[in-house]
Image (cartoon, rainbow, N blue to C red):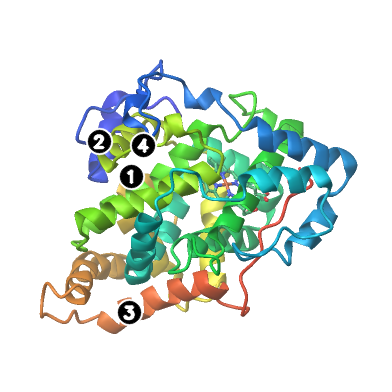
Amino acid sequence: MENLSRRRVLTLGAALGLTSVALEAPSVWSWSSAGSIAHADTVTDPFQVWDPAAEQVAAQLLADGSIPAVNAAWNSWRLNRDPLPAGMPAYLTSYLQQVNKLPTWADPAKLAKAQALYKRLSGYLFISESLGSGFLSTVIPREARSVYWSAGGANMQDRAAKTFTFGYDLHNEKAFDPTGSFITTANKTRLVHAMVRKLLPLSPHFQATADQPLPISNGDILVTFHSVATVAYNNLEKWGVRTTASEEVADLHAWQVALSLLGVQDQFIPQTWADAKAQAQQMLWPRVAPTAEGNDLAQKLLDAVKGLGTDLSTGFVSEMVRYLIGDTYWSWLGLPTDLISRALIKVNWPIYVAFREGSTLIVPSSFNLFDGFVRGISMMYLNNGASATQTPITLPSANRPG
Ligand code: HEM
């Protein structure tokens, strides 16, 4: 099922408006780092690169049983300006002292511009990322299987809430400021991924389908980046949401910093959106396919989104997912059909966006429905629809039981 024919991949990419060059799963990695922020004209396969510095720390935490103490200590480590908490082993403190900061090439002016842009566009981004990219992740086999067989796969509501914490902290008007939380959140996430690399190889269920020595390589993180950020970039363009050239540069810069904080090497981080799109053609679209694990997660994710506080019908949410990820991927997931919502979304969402963006005076008949929807999804990021605080990211100490 994962061996997509070139013709099928082209059709799928075209359905999402993403195919400007031929798509084909390359047998040999060929994206040159000339298109990266490292500017070096080398070709290294990012699917063969992991994160040894973080993995060494994860291995020690597992070996000395400090994970519960670290999770407790992390409760008081939320804001970028928070000092590293007491109660962590010295080797973890020492590692975090080295990585818990912006990369030297980060440009404060661009980050400030990204923060202002996110303040304006976060509603659209949350829709694209939760209902678009969230479900897209279930048709990326390596991600679907990793998530399914890790501890979080057994509780999608909690897992979705933790992932929303990352999105909320990034698309926040203070994200990179001392009073923002993104640098801290990204560092926690990097260590969660390192821990997963130690744990999943111990899962016989995961091992039955594993096709690489360790999960979550730099290449896999970039695949997810494209399924989130490059897809959101395309959606904003498709929906006629106006952004200036410098805002687009700032958006990418925020993501370049995010990727670096997640442990992706500079040689793989795309320099421009054109480079990002070229990279996505090579690494994302040829890799999508349905899996049993992904389909199960998609159903659970639909329930989780409903459970996180939106009062929209399951049919509406499912059809919004279809609108965002396209008929083909949606049909793989076996989500419920709602013909009335489908027609309504197709006709009225573009008018709603055009009206909000001031490019039409026509008020869509379902303005209130969509406005409530955007607010509901945004609230879900803000407080997970239930509690007044975000769900903290914690280190897992085991895999999903059988
Ligand atoms: C955990 C974000 C890429 C697999 C997390 C968490 C966040 C996150 C915020 C912590 C929440 C939680 O524990 O559930 C991201 C971002 C990525 C990315 C922003 C790329 C831009 C990937 C990839 C994979 C992956 C490529 C697998 C191929 C996992 C797994 C967990 C996790 C298995 C742990 C779930 C658990 O606790 O059991 N990720 N992730 N992630 N991520 Fe990622």
Dot 2: element: helix
- Work out how far the residue at label 1 is from the one at label 3, CA to CA, in angstroms: 27 Å
**Residue at label 1?**
328
Residue type at mark 2: give it: Thr
- Work out how far the residue at label 4 is from the one at label 2, CA to CA, in angstroms: 25 Å
Q: Residues within 10 Å of mark 1 (few under 14, many from 20)?
A: few
The picture places residue 261, in percent across and down from the top left corner, at 54, 46
Q: Are marks 1 and 3 in contact (CB under 8 Å)?
A: no
The picture places residue 17, in percent across and down from the top left corner, at 22, 45
Residue at image location 38% in from the left, 35% down from the top: 37
Mark found first going from the N terminus, 3 or 2: 2
Residue type at mark 3: give it: Asp
Mark found first going from the N terminus, 1 or 2: 2
Mark found first going from the N terminus, 1 or 4: 4
- Work out how far the residue at label 4 is from the one at label 3, CA to CA, in angstroms: 34 Å
Dot 1: element: helix
Dot 4: element: loop
| Closer-to-camera residue (326/124) | 124
Residue type at mark 4: give it: Pro
Point out the frontmost of discs 4 and 3. Answer: 4
| Closer-to-camera residue (44/142) | 44
Q: Are marks 1 and 2 in contact (CB under 8 Å)?
A: yes
- Work out how far the residue at label 1 is from the one at label 4, CA to CA, in angstroms: 28 Å
Residue at image location 61% in from the left, 57% down from the top: 184
**Residue at label 3?**
371
Q: Is residue 326 left or right of residue 365?
A: right
- 331 up-or-down from 317: above or below: above
Looking at the rendered structure, which numbered label has been put on residue 11?
Answer: 2
- Work out how far the residue at label 1 is from the one at label 2, CA to CA, in angstroms: 9 Å
Point out the frontmost of discs 1 and 4. Answer: 4
